[in-house]
């Protein structure tokens, strides 16, 4: 497992990579490759969310479910795709909400959200890998245990974080979060199937910045260049 994981996360997740479930997950991923399956994102990008947003720099968590399973899309950040890829429907709706919520926001020409991650927005998927062209194929293999641990440790060791939970799957993670220390914002998922059920108009981006300013922290510049 990763030798290049940011040292702040290595400390926060002390011993996690030595546990039986993680060893079983590693064996599963090796078996997938040996059987000729392509796995997304590429190995160097699997832990991008953690490496772009160190444990002690996290201010906001936006939780996704699964990496994109198409060629060239996934690069380790939830809802984000690499430059040059078509902007996915859910991210299009996120941009639409930003357009209404944040004065002066302009919809970007691409869907790479690394600039958010580098400001302290942890773009975490519950499952960190997927088999090419097969949605949900790596669910239930151990990643959820690992990412639940990430959420739990952030809740326990940090204070004043903002957890943005879109859709029922993400909202089920609220049980891991101490609401006496942290803020949870919930809404429908930005998918075209549900965005009109409460995602649009939720104003989570301006609410997040208002809370950060209230706590004496720098707000997020949501504009992607």
Image (cartoon, rainbow, N blue to C red):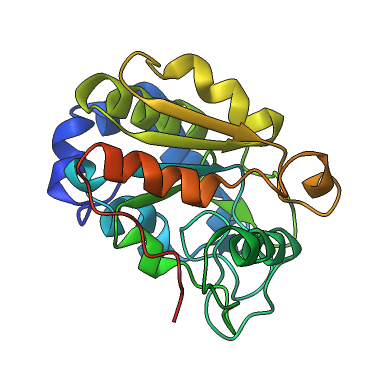
Q: Residue 23's x, y, as percent?
A: 37, 33
Asked whether, in this view, residue 98 is left or right of residue 195, the answer is left
- Indicate the quadrant where residue 214 lies: top left
Please tell me how many numbered marks the rendered image carries: 0
Asked whether, in this view, residue 43 is left or right of residue 16, the answer is right
| Above or below 114: residue 136 | above
Q: Is residue 64 visible?
A: yes
- Closer-to-camera residue (162/9): 162
Q: Residue 68's x, y, as percent?
A: 64, 60
Q: Is residue 59 visible?
A: no
Asked whether, in this view, residue 196 is left or right of residue 154, the answer is right
- Closer-to-camera residue (114/17): 114
| Above or below 190: residue 177 | above
- Indicate the quadrant where residue 107 lies: bottom right
Q: Which residue is drawn at the image coordinates 22% and 42% (left, top)?
A: 55
- Closer-to-camera residue (38/83): 83
Q: Residue 16's x, y, as percent?
A: 27, 28
- Closer-to-camera residue (221/87): 221
| Above or below 166: residue 203 | below
Q: Residue 206's x, y, as percent?
A: 48, 50
Q: Which residue is drawn at the image coordinates 48% and 28% (left, top)?
A: 184
Q: Which residue is drawn at the image coordinates 71% and 50% (left, top)?
A: 190
Quadrant location, the C terminus: bottom left
Q: Which residue is drawn at the image coordinates 41% and 27% (left, top)?
A: 183
């Amino acid at each position: 497992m990763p030798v290049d994981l940011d040292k702040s996360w290595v400390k926060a997740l002390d011993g996690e990579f030595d546990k039986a479930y993680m060893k079983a997950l590693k064996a599963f991923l090796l078996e997938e490759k040996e059987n000729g399956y392509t796995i997304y994102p590429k190995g160097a990008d699997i832990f991008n969310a953690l490496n772009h947003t160190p444990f002690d720099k996290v201010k906001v968590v936006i939780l996704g479910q699964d990496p994109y399973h198409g060629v060239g899309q996934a690069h380790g950040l939830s809802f984000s795709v690499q430059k040059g890829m078509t902007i996915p429907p859910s991210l299009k709706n996120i941009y639409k909400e930003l357009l209404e919520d944040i004065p002066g926001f302009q919809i970007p020409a691409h869907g790479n959200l690394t600039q958010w991650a580098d400001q302290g927005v942890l773009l975490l998927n519950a499952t960190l890998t997927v088999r090419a062209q097969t949605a949900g194929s790596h669910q239930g293999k151990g990643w959820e245990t690992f990412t639940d641990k990430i959420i739990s440790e952030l809740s326990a060791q940090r204070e004043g974080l903002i957890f943005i939970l879109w859709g029922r799957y993400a909202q089920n993670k609220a049980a891991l979060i101490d609401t006496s220390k942290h803020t949870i914002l919930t809404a429908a998922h930005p998918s075209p199937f549900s965005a009109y059920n409460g995602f649009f108009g939720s104003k989570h981006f301006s609410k997040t910045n208002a809370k950060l300013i209230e706590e004496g922290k720098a707000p997020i510049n949501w504009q992607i260049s």
